Image (spheres, grey):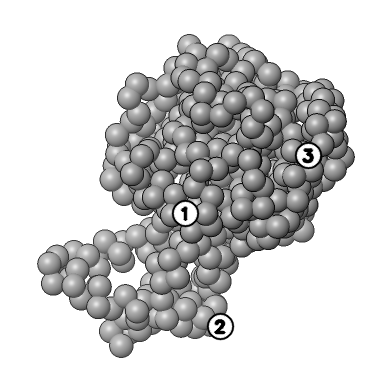
Amino acid sequence: MQIRHGLRYLYHQRGLKRLLGVKGGLRLVRSLTTVLYPLLPRTRSVCARLNPGRVFKRWGERWLATLDLARQLTPKSLPARLNVGAIPRIVTMIVVSDIRVDPRVYKAAQTAAKRGFQVRIIIPCFHGTREPPTPVPDWGPSIVFDFLQASHHALLNHFYPWLIDSNVKKQLLASGEGVIHAHDLNTCVMALAAGRELGLPVICDFHEWFSENVQWSTRAKAYVRNTWFKRTVMRRAEALCMQQADAVVTVCDSIANELLKLQPRRDGVHVVRNIPSFDQGVAVTGVPLRQACGVDDATFLLLWQGGIGPSRLLEPVIAALAYLPGVVFAIRGPGLEDGSPYWNHYEQVAANEGVSAQLRLLPPVPSAQVVAAAHGANAGIWTLPNLSKNFYFALPNKIFEYLTSGLPVVGANFPEVKRLIDKYEVGFTFDPYDSKSIAQVVAKLRDNPAISARCAANTRVALRDMNADTEWNKLGDLYDSIFQQRRGGGVE
């Protein structure tokens, strides 16, 4: 009851009524009350150890700061953009990511540097920690990193309001110059606010479709679609970005089309796909793949290379090995150290299916080596659960990395991946929940060397058509276009 009274106080006295309207405010109060009631035992436990006044004061301050920024970003209340004239030839990027394994940010920074821009990358958190990586990545003399080390930045992706942190905005106001390039929705709102005050152009780059993504449910102990409240907040933020950003970029046509349905733009949405360069195939510093798996050249080796965990749906692939005698499945990714929870989980799944001898679990390789490290496999596999539109429309880096490695691809039959695989005839698609369907497409490649060889040869045709330099030049041209709109002045 106290929670409901507190929410009603915020609604009537602190601007929520004016911001949301009567119906919207009532829905918000009901939805938040529903979410908070199950947490009461935990809340009481926390408050017994901490000063309740301090806890709720911080919670209230975060709400009020969110409301203030929301009012600032309401289109009717946005001040006219400052006429600062020419801007320096600088790209200020902001990203919440582990940049050691984020090839999209790396390629964007390299593209800007090749066009003669100085690049500053502001990182509000480092993979959930407060410390920068050691050593700090060296991406070239034109690219510098600015790590923020405040503890609450690590919570930005996980707790309301997800998209706003006043300290990050202050950092952008203090060091933002040139063109501000915000990577993903969790930085775009802050970038728009800072860009408006500084009079600087802002690019909003959606690596994923945040409003249609998933979140971890502690009750279900699984990933589920975003709640109605979270989707609503993020949809409004996406519409705001579509309205106010100088340019909007995303990773595939399907997400671009959906964003345009949400909020049309005269210049549309720029699509820059995550196509790696052939020169990413540097030498592997570790053991070659087949040697690491302990298999000979006659064994059909299926490779998964990338993130692991509950959102990857690898269990049906492991189960499919029961229908594929002699096939070995290698999973390579972070968190697969011997004895780790994911290691134990996948080993248990394999044991339950009676295929332990066909499963190999390998630690990750540096992102610069993923293409070369895949050599030796007979095919690469990609799959995801169909939990959200963001998953359904995915066109991940992994697909292009497999193609660059010259591997046939077997993938979940989702629109973007199926369109690419069918167009260039580089592999086959399957039902991601059906182990027999997965086994059938892998068996086509294993039992038909001519088909496998043709798919492998077609990867080069596909990559010539989807040239990495041509793709990333779209982003370089966008930087130059925005810079030229300011008459090309400033510091070279």
Separation of marks 3 and 2 at Cα, in angstroms: 61 Å
Let me know if residue 491 appears in the view. no
Please name the amino acid that badge 2 sits on.
Answer: Lys
Crowdedness near tag 1: few (<14), some (14–19) or many (≥20) residues, C-alpha within 10 Å = some
Q: Name the residue under label 3.
A: 447
Q: In this view, does 271 lie above or below 86?
A: below
Q: Distance between the residues labelled 1 and 3?
A: 26 Å
Specify the amino acid type for callout 3: Asp
Mark 3 closeness class: few <14, some 14–19, many ≥20 residues within 10 Å: few
Residue at 30 percent of width and 88 percent of height:
1
Asked if residue 135 lies left or right of residue 281, the reply is left
In-front residue for pair 90/329: 329
Q: Which element carries disc 3, helix, strand or loop? A: helix
Task: Kindly report the distance in space between the C-alpha atoms of the residues bearing marks 1 and 2.
Answer: 53 Å
Please indicate whether residue 472 sits to the left or right of residue 427 in the image. left
User: Residue at coordinates 50% horizontally, 39% vertically from top-left?
Assistant: 360
